[in-house]
Amino acid sequence: MSDLSPISFMFVAAGVARRARISLARLVPSRVNAAPSWEGHGEAPGTVALGVPVTDPGYWEGRYVLTELTLRKADGETLVVNDAIVSVTREKQIVRTTLVGLNGTIKEYICDGDHEVGITVGIVAVDAGGQIVDDYPGEGVRKVRKFLDENQAIEINSVFLSIFGIDRVVVTRFSIRQETASNRQVIDITALSDEDYIIKSNEY
């Protein structure tokens, strides 16, 4: 496969979120109704740094959190999307059997189903220098469509999807509605996770 240069779509980013604030949490002895004893612990109690979420609405005003997503076709062409929100749904394949006199059903686990991946992509019009312009992002939409029209699995990579072990998907549906009130176009994509399988047979 050939390695083509990545295509990157920029979008509005008023700033980069700073690191989460750090608070110190003091260790609390687990002994109750007795003086604490640190004998045998090797060292005196100390403090550790714990990350805490920033929940102040004022802190996030004018800020955007970027969730980058990378797509790669079989021919090596790569697309990097900087504005993407992903959701993952998975349904287990379970056979339920109803028996007379039994409250509820008997569940028999068969296998795990595919992951259904929902992706919302935002594309903003930019000029040759990467500056945002007041125009419809037609060229960006055309390039994204090339990946959506693929009739085979495409590689996909993001920090979020890696948690679920998803690195390849098949696009099953996409939806786009023309937006004329801004220079940003949203595309909703539905895909299924795809894996390689080896099927063995004992019949020769």
Image: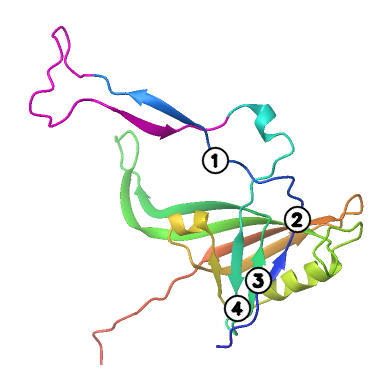
Query: Tag 2's secondary structure?
Result: loop
Q: On screen, 94 above or below 77?
A: above
Disc 3 residue type (three-letter) = Leu
Q: Which residue is label 2 attached to?
A: 11
Disc 2 residue type (three-letter) = Phe
In front: label 2 or label 4: 2
Asked whether the residues under the numbered discs 3 and 4 touch, taking CB atoms below 8 Å apart as contact, a structural biologist would say no
Question: Residue at the location (79% across, 68% down)?
Answer: 140
Query: Tag 4's secondary structure?
Result: loop
Query: Which callout, 2 or 3, points at the residue further toward the start of the chain?
Result: 2
| Residue 96 coordinates in the image, percent (x, y) | 36, 49
Residue 79 is a magenta residue: no
Q: Which residue is label 3 attached to?
A: 79
| Residue 84 coordinates in the image, percent (x, y) | 65, 55
**Residues in magenta?**
29-54
Query: Which callout, 1 or 4, points at the residue further toward the start of the chain?
Result: 1
**SS majority, magenta:** loop
Q: State the mark number for residue 19.
A: 1
Real-space Cα distance between discs 3 and 4? 9 Å
Q: Quadrant of the C terminus?
A: bottom left
Query: Tag 3's secondary structure?
Result: strand
Real-space Cα distance between discs 2 and 4? 23 Å
